[in-house]
Amino acid sequence: MRHLHIPSPKGRVCVKVDLRKAFDSVRWSFVKEVMKGLSFPPLIIELIMQCIQTPSFSVLINGSPHGFFNSNCGLRQGDPLSPILFVLTMQVLTNSIDRVVSTGAMGHFLRPELIVSHLCFADDLILFSDDSTSSALGIQQLLNDFSQASGLQINLQKSQVFLSFPDSSFSTENGISSASLLVKYLGIPLFASGLSHSLCLPLVDKVHCQLQSWSGLLLSKARKLELLKSVL
């Protein structure tokens, strides 16, 4: 990411993909097919599908539940099974990306022996490619195919493209707006240039506010020192 802004013959592109209501929109039929593809035993598949399909939901009105209704898609957040099933779902996208890169439909700006085509953690997805028209169309087709199969929708309004060439047509070809770093990924700031004083100011301000909130607490010197160590 630090060298993303440096021009290269192929151009550098980073696409931060936002999935709309990721856990809530996964198709159950897709989850079932994924488990079949991974050779899960039929009994295990049936038990898992019972767990995700049978729960009902109620609406609280003035603190009291009224009525019950069933859902027809999605994985419940808070269910221990949900993160595992969602990771298996996203693994299908990972395999698809690897296949598209290997066929050349999605180009890359790194050396062949060091290709990082994407980073994926749960529903946080970043794609790396060159800025060619074929790569833009390849990414668009890839995301559309995955969306139609899995039910996961790409939020074009919140997705962003970071380009090494400001005048690149990559963003207009796939419908995702271009932006500039600084941006956060998994809570970590990503920036194209070296670490500077201005980039550190938000962190300094956050620590300062945290320390200020302790000033009114009736804590001993030893406890305040322990809190200070836990922050720094």
Image (cartoon, grey):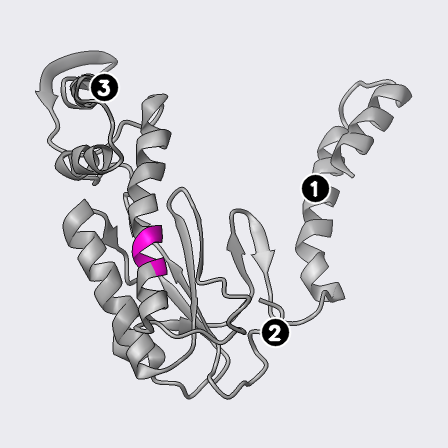
Look at the image and tell me in which quarter the C terminus lies. Answer: top right
Mark 3 residue crowding within 10 angstroms, few (<14) / some (14–19) / many (20+): few
Question: Dot 3 corresponds to which residue?
Answer: 44
Residue 11 relative to residue 169: left or right: right
Q: Which residues are magenta?
A: 94-98
Residue drawn where x is 22% and y is 22% of the image: 41
Q: Are marks 3 and 2 in contact (CB under 8 Å)?
A: no
Q: Are marks 1 and 3 in contact (CB under 8 Å)?
A: no
Question: Dot 1 corresponds to which residue?
Answer: 209
Front one among 34 and 168: 34
Residue 57 locus on image (x, y percent): 17, 19
Label 3 sits on a secondary structure element that is helix
Residue drawn where x is 56% and y is 74% of the image: 4
Residue 210 locus on image (x, y percent): 70, 37
Question: Of discs 1 and 3, which sits in the foreground?
Answer: 3
Residue 20 relative to residue 16: left or right: left
Q: Check disc 1 and give the amino acid type.
A: Cys
Q: Check disc 2 and give the amino acid type.
A: His
Cα distance in 3D space between marks 1 and 3: 50 Å
